[in-house]
Every structure is written in structure tokens, then in C-alpha cells.
């Protein structure tokens, strides 16, 4: 990986990590969409301007729903329309996805089998309540995943094999409190250690297969350092939560360029619905693949699921992704789409309401769909603020 502005940080026993700039787009996408655009909002406007997910289309969708076109569909809407190639699907408006309700999980065993955030090791009491009650405190919702996270290889057939890694360690803050909401993929060999200090969560974790992770609520008092310390046997690094709230996500990688830590997060904003999404970003072949995932709220509760396609669209000569979002009952909730490249994605988060068009951004590490969990992503979604 050759980042435009790499940040190298000395960690642990003189190990280095690479911090990826969150909104670096593939060059082809930049040429088509935004030329010199750096700002996320400009990218979203460019996506709409090029009709990849346009407000007028969303308005027509809403009218169709009001007219009653929300019954379950037996068409191929969840995989795009039939009788077209996947490359042609990428050049269609909204990737060919429709707004019909469907079965829960899209009636897809792979979506149903997605790794979920588990509550077995979560705090039984709110350890952040006292700190959060003090004026000026800031609350952050933060998801961390670590393990096999090589840089993007989506443009080629390359597929790095994972290896066993020891991630025993902790996350902590200098002041404030951490609430443990959920764990991800902690198996019989992993555990959260008994908590005695609200500023620290300690754990035993080993990866291969899959990644492990935590979903946290972190509360920082006014005037205190907003850094979240991640200190493990494999990687030690700091996450600036105030910067994370602005950027949406980030990733730190080990010098082996195979393993690392990815994270996404946000702060609560009045009258702005926000949350995270995470799941699998797998490829069928070079420059073409699919994603599936779980959409979660601030407590880690599953709101629904997404499924979509990503790849290089021949007509537009751009790397695009499109998808559909349904709730846990299978009801249509929205369409999404945008651009991806160099391990990050950014785009539009549509809803049933044509006036409520938000955005999403995140990080991915692609891989073929094997039984060891390679090919994952994590990101943040936001609806329009009221």
C-alpha cells in the first residue's frame, strides 16, 4: 500500500503501524466524480450529480411506496435485475436495486450467518453513567475490530492468507469511563477479564480464523484527553476519538501488512440518526465482488441488514458500490451507493424519505469468501439531521 500521506507511528517494541487517511479515493473514481475533491460532502454531491443515487430517484421510490409498492418481491432485486452481467448492473441506476420488501436476511443464509455483536461479556451495569452526568462530558460510540486486515487488493486476484496472532491486552482512557456494550467473535479461547476500573477493559484474544472486536461507549470529561489507548501483545496505538468523530473511521496496520486494527465511531448529535455497519467485503474476482453486513445502533442492537455489489463500472470507468438496506423483518429501509478504493468507501445513505438522504463512510479489507473470515469492512452511517 502506498498512501498519499502515510503517518508512521513507533509503537510497542519499535513496531510501526500505518494510519490510512479515511477519505482517499481511487484515482479513477476521483477523475469521474470529484477531480480534486477532498471533502466527504462534496463527494456525496458528486455521486448524486452523476446519478449513482440521485434525490429525484429516491423521491420516485417514496411515491411508489406510498402507492403500496412495498410488498415482498420474488424478483432478483436483492442481487440486481436478471439477464444482465454484474458489470452491467454496476452501470445501472442504483445498481439495479429496487425498494420492495423482502424476507428477513434477504432469505440469504450467508447474511443470516453474519457475525453479530454479542452481549454475553457486556457490562451488566452502566459504568459510564457517573461521568456522563457531569456537564461538558462527551460520549463516543466506538467499534474496534482487529486481526487479518491486509490493505486493499480488490483490483487483483491477490488474496493474503491469515495467520495466528496474539492480541491479549486492553483498551483504556486516561480519564472518564468505558462501557462495554458488545463483543465480536470472541470464541472459547477469548474472554473479557473481570472489570475493576471503569477506565479500562482488558481481554484475552487470538485471531485465526476471523477477526475479534469490541463495541464501546466511551465518555470523556471536559478538558481531558480524548485518546483511547489500544495496548496488546501485537499492537499498541492510540485513537484520537475527537478525530474519529470527524473522520468516521480509521485503520492502523502492523509492518507485516497483513494484520491490524480498524475502527469506526461517532458522537451523538441531537436529531441526527447515526450508527455503524459491519460485515463481509468479499470478491468474486479482480475488481468485482459483493458485501453483506449488519446495521447497528448506539447500543449495538441490530437494526437490519445490507447486501450489495461493488466493482469497476465499465461505462463510467469508476469503482462503485451499491446496496439495499432492510430491517430485521425484511422491510425496505433504504438504498446506498458510492465509491470505493484504496481500502475506503464513501457514499450516500438513502432512506424511505426522499428528503432524508444521509451519508456513509468506512474501511474495507477484501478477500475471497473462505471459511477463515478474510474480507471484512466496518463503517458509519448517518441520516440527514432534522
Image (cartoon, rainbow, N blue to C red):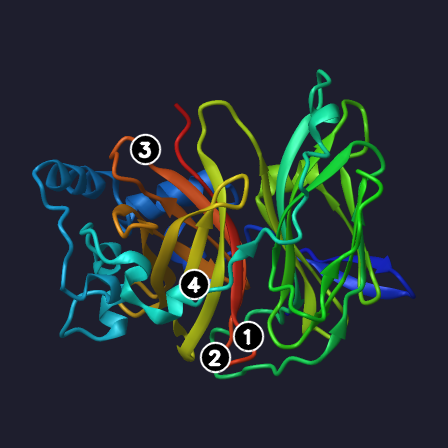
Q: Residue at x 51, y 80 (%)?
A: 371
With respect to residue 122, does 116 lie above or below? below
Going from N to C along the chain, the mark reached first, 4 or 2, is: 4
Q: Residue at x 26, y 34 (%)?
A: 353
Badge 3 is on which residue?
356
The answer to whether residue 157 shows anywhere in this view is yes
Q: Which element is circle 4 on?
A: helix
**Circle 4 or circle 2, nearest the eye:** 2
Question: Between marks 4 and 3, how big is the CA–CA gap?
Answer: 29 Å
Among numbered discs 1 and 3, the one appearing first in the sequence: 3
Is residue 221 depicted above or below 42 in this figure?
above
Could you say where residue 180 lies in the image, as x and y percent from the top left? 68, 45
Residue 267, label in figure? none
Is 8 or 218 nearer to us in this picture? 218
Element under label 2? loop
- Decide: marks 2, 1 in contact (CB < 8 A)? yes
Q: Is residue 4 visible?
A: no
Q: Is residue 34 left or right of residue 253?
A: left
Residue shown at the point (86%, 59%) measured from the top left: 10
Q: CA distance from mark 2 to mark 3?
A: 35 Å
Quadrant in which residue 357 is drawn: top left
**Label drawn at residue 28:** 4
The residue under label 1 is 374
Tag shown at residue 368: 2
Q: CA distance from mark 2 to mark 1?
A: 7 Å
Element type at mark 1? loop
Q: CA distance from mark 1 to mark 3?
A: 34 Å
Amino acid at each position: 500500500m502506498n498512501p498519499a500521506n502515510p503517518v508512521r507511528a513507533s509503537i510497542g517494541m519499535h513496531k510501526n503501524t500505518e494510519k490510512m487517511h479515511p477519505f482517499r479515493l481511487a484515482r479513477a473514481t476521483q477523475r469521474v466524480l470529484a477531480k480534486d475533491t477532498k471533502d466527504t460532502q462534496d463527494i456525496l454531491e458528486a455521486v448524486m450529480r452523476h446519478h449513482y443515487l440521485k434525490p429525484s430517484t429516491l423521491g420516485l421510490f417514496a411515491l411508489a411506496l406510498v402507492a403500496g409498492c412495498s410488498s415482498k418481491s420474488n424478483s432478483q432485486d436483492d442481487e440486481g435485475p436478471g439477464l444482465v452481467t454484474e458489470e452491467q448492473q454496476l452501470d445501472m441506476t442504483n445498481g439495479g436495486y429496487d425498494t420492495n420488501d423482502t424476507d428477513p436476511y434477504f432469505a440469504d443464509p450467508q447474511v443470516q450467518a453474519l457475525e453479530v455483536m454479542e452481549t454475553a461479556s457486556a457490562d451488566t451495569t452502566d459504568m459510564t453513567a457517573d461521568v456522563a452526568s457531569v456537564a461538558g462530558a462527551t460520549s463516543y460510540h466506538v467499534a474496534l475490530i482487529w486481526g487479518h486486515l491486509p490493505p486493499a487488493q480488490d483490483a487483483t486476484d491477490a488474496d493474503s492468507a491469515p495467520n495466528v496472532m496474539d492480541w491479549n491486552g486492553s483498551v483504556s482512557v486516561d480519564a472518564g469511563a468505558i462501557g462495554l456494550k458488545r463483543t465480536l467473535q470472541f470464541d472459547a479461547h477469548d474472554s473479557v477479564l473481570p472489570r475493576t476500573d471503569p477506565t479500562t477493559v482488558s481481554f484475552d484474544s487470538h485471531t485465526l480464523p476471523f477477526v475479534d472486536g469490541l463495541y464501546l461507549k466511551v465518555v470523556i470529561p471536559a478538558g481531558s484527553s480524548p485518546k483511547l489507548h489500544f495496548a496488546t501483545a501485537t499492537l499498541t496505538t492510540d485513537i484520537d476519538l475527537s478525530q474519529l468523530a470527524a473522520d468516521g473511521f480509521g485503520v492502523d496496520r502492523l509492518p507485516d501488512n497483513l494484520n491490524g486494527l480498524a475502527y469506526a465511531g461517532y458522537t451523538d448529535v441531537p436529531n441526527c440518526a447515526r450508527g455503524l455497519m459491519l460485515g463481509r467485503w468479499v470478491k468474486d474476482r479482480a475488481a468485482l465482488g459483493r458485501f453483506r453486513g449488519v446495521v447497528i445502533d448506539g447500543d449495538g442492537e441490530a437494526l437490519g441488514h445490507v447486501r450489495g455489489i461493488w466493482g469497476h463500472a465499465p461505462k463510467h470507468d469508476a469503482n462503485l458500490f451499491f446496496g439495499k438496506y432492510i430491517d430485521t423483518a425484511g422491510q425496505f429501509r433504504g438504498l446506498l451507493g458510492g465509491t470505493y478504493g484504496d481500502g475506503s468507501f464513501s457514499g450516500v445513505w438513502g432512506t424511505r424519505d426522499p428528503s432524508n438522504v444521509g451519508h456513509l463512510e468506512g474501511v474495507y479489507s477484501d478477500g475471497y469468501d473462505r471459511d477463515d473470515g478474510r474480507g471484512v469492512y466496518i463503517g458509519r452511517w448517518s441520516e440527514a439531521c432534522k
